[in-house]
Image: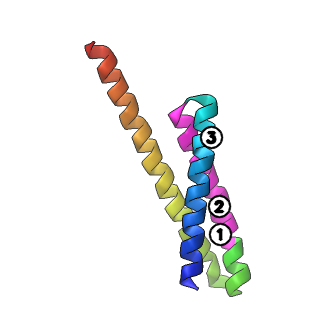
Amino acid sequence: MSSFFLILIGFFIVVANMIGFISYKKKKNLYYSAFTIFISAVLFGAIGGVLALLVIRDAFAIFYGFQVGYYLIMNSVIVLSIAIITTLIRTYNNRTI
């Protein structure tokens, strides 16, 4: 059962990052992309919770869905920190030239 949720976590992370990449290509804004991944994390966490309830059929199965959402939110925090570091590097390079 745990391998199903590991595959689900991996699949949702890949899909959320692809959605974030597409939004970055459209808007050319890293912060918008990080926010899109964060919103996707909330959505996919809810979907993971519902899938866990349907598969396990126990009231505590919702915590598996929360775990899926937790990993996706950590993914969006990593993307946001990369966006902040990129902005700081761009600002520093533009200031020193």
The amino acid type, in three-letter code, at marker 2 is Phe
Judging from the image, the colouring scheme is rainbow
The amino acid type, in three-letter code, at marker 3 is Ile
Disc 2 target residue: 44
Assign the magenta stretch its main secondary structure: helix
Disc 1 target residue: 48
Q: Is residue 55 left or right of residue 34?
A: right
Q: Position of residue 84 (x, y in %)?
A: 40, 36
Q: What crowding class fits label 2: few (fewer than 14 Cα within 10 Å), some (14-19), or many (20 or more)?
A: many
Q: Secondary structure at mark 1?
A: helix
Q: Measured along the vertical axis of the image, is residue 20 above or below residue 12? A: above
Q: What crowding class fits label 1: few (fewer than 14 Cα within 10 Å), some (14-19), or many (20 or more)?
A: many
Disc 3 target residue: 22
Residue at left offset 56%, top offset 40%: 33
Q: Position of residue 34 (x, y in %)?
A: 53, 43
* Residue at the outermost right position: 54
Q: Is residue 50 left or right of residue 38?
A: right
The amino acid type, in three-letter code, at marker 1 is Gly
Q: Secondary structure at mark 3?
A: helix
Q: What crowding class fits label 3: few (fewer than 14 Cα within 10 Å), some (14-19), or many (20 or more)?
A: some
Magenta segment: 29-49
Residue 58 shows in the view: no
Dot 1 or dot 3: first in sequence order is 3
Instruction: Look at discs 1 and 3 and give the one toward the viewer.
Output: 3
How far apart are labels 1 and 3 at the CA level?
A: 22 Å
Residue at left offset 74%, top offset 80%: 54
How far apart are labels 2 and 3 at the CA level?
A: 17 Å
How far apart are labels 1 and 2 at the CA level?
A: 6 Å
Q: Position of residue 4 (x, y in %)?
A: 59, 79
Dot 2 or dot 3: first in sequence order is 3
Q: Are marks 1 and 2 in contact (CB under 8 Å)?
A: yes
